[in-house]
Amino acid sequence: MKKINNFLILILAVAIVSPSCNSPTNEKEHENKREASFKIISAFGKNSKLSGMTDNGLSISADGRLFCVINETDAFLWTALQNGDDAKSRKLHGSITYPGNITVSMARGLTLANHKLYGVTENGGDNGGGTIYSIESKTQAVEIACEFTNKENLKPISLPVFDGDSSLIGLSENEKKQKLFWYVYNIYSKKITKKTECTGDWFSFGYFPNGCVQMGSDKCIYITDVFASGKPGTILRIDKNLEKTTLLYEMDAKVAGEPDGDLVFMNGKIYGLTSGGGPTDDGLIYSINMDGTGFEVLATFNGDDGHLPTCLFRSSTGMLYGTCYSGGEYNRGCFFEFNTKDKNLKILKHFKDSEGSYPNGRIVEGKDGSLFGFLRHGGKGEKGAVYRIKL
C-alpha cells in the first residue's frame, strides 16, 4: 500500500509540474532562443590579401553568384558561389589601372541592373574623373562602361540605383566640391543622359549622405544621413525628376539618432534602423509613413539582444531580417528577425569568435530563400567570412 501511495504522489507531482514546463511563457522564451541553421560558406585565410573589411556587404547576381567590393588598402572584387566551395572564392581584380598608371579604388559596392552588376570609382579614367564599371556574372569580366570627363564636371560619390528600366541614377560632386549633382546613365546607350544640380540647402540636410542612395516604392530617391550639420539624423526624399529635395524627417535626439543601413519600403511605410536610441541607447527599429508623418519606434535593442543595428533586409516572405554589429550573448553581434505584424523581435543567431564575428554590410537572399552576409572578423584565418542562414 505504501508503494502505491508513493506512486500516486509521484503522478500527482508530475501533473502539477508539467503544465508549467509547457506554459506559453516558456514556449515563448524557447522560441526567442532558437537559432537558425548557420554555416560559414567561405572564410578569408591568413595569407590571403582578401578580408571581410567592407561596409557594403554582398550583392547577388541574377544567376545566384555572390559578389562584393572589399576595401583594404586596394579594393578587390571577390565572388563566392552559393555551394560554399572555397576554391571558387577568389580575387577577380585588384584596383583598376588606367592609362597613365592611375590606380583607383572600387569600394562602394555593386548594383544589379538587368543581368549585370555595376559599380563606380571616384577617380581614374583618362581624365581622372572616375568611372562606372560593369561585371558580367558568368564570365566575371569587368568593363569600363563610362569615364567621367571635364565636360560632365561630375565625380561619382555614391553607389547608383537602378530605376528598373534602363538607367542608373547616382550622386556626384563637381571638381571643386562646391556643388552636388544627380546624373542619369543609360546602360544601353552607355551615355550620361541627364545632369541636375541638387536643390535645397544640402549643408543643412547633410552634405554627404551616410546611407546609400535608394529607390523607393514610389520611384523617388531616398537618402539617410547621420552627419546633418550636427543633427541626430535625417531622411531626405528627392522627387522623380531629381529637381526637388525634401527634408522628409529629422530625428529627435531624445528618441533616436544616427540612422544606419538600407531603408525598407513596404505597405506604404518606410522601415529603418538607428544605431542609437532606445532606453539603453543600443539602437532601434522604426517605421514612418511615406509622407514623413507617423514616426514610430517598433522595437529597441538592449545589448543582450544586440547593439548597433546596421542592416535591415526584407525577405521574399515579407519578414524583416537584420544584424547588429555587436552585443548579443558573446558581444560579437547577432542576426535578428522582426515581424512587422506583431512587432516581435527574435534573435536567430549570436555570433562568436570561433565561427566569425561582427556582421557588417548588406544581407542578400538566394533563390532557395537562404540569406547571406559578411562577418568582419573571425572565421578560418581570422580575416572574416561569408555566412549562410537557412530559416
Image (tube, grey):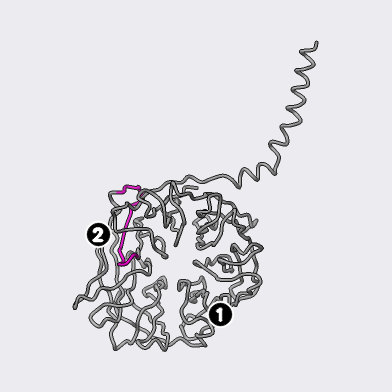
Q: SS of the residue at dot 1?
A: loop
Chain-order first, disc 2 or disc 1? 2
* Residue 80 part of the magenta-drawn span: yes
Q: Position of residue 82 (x, y in %)?
A: 36, 50
Query: Would residue 109 be visible to someone looking at this image?
Result: yes
Residue tagged by mark 2?
139
Can the viewer see residue 374 in this picture?
A: no
In the rendered image, the vertical position of residue 339 relative to residue 21, given as above or below = below
Provide the secondary structure element on which disc 2 rests. Answer: loop
Which amino acid type is marked by label 2? Thr
Q: Which of marks 2 and 1 is in front?
A: 1
What residue is drawn where x is 25% and y is 70%?
A: 96
> Quarter of the image holding residue 98?
bottom left
Q: How crowded is mark 1: few (under 14 residues within 10 Å), some or many (20 or more)?
A: few
C-alpha gap between disc 2 and disc 1: 46 Å
Depicted 25 relative to depicted 178: above or below:
above
Q: Which residue is drawn at 65% across and 56% down?
A: 342
Q: Does residue 292 sit above or below 361 in this rendering? A: below
User: Magenta stretch?
Assistant: 72-86
Q: Where is residue 292 in the image (x, y as percent from the top left)?
A: 61, 76
Residue 176: where, in percent of width, then height? Answer: 37, 88
Evaluate if marks 2 and 1 touch, with contact meaning CB atoms under 8 Å apart: no
Q: In which quarter of the image is residue 163?
A: bottom left
Which mark is drawn over residue 230? Answer: 1
In magenta stretch: residue 130 = no
- Relative to 83, say whether 76 is above or below: below
- Quarter of the picture containing the N terminus is top right
Q: Is residue 299 left or right of residue 317?
A: right
The residue type indicated by label 1 comes to Gly
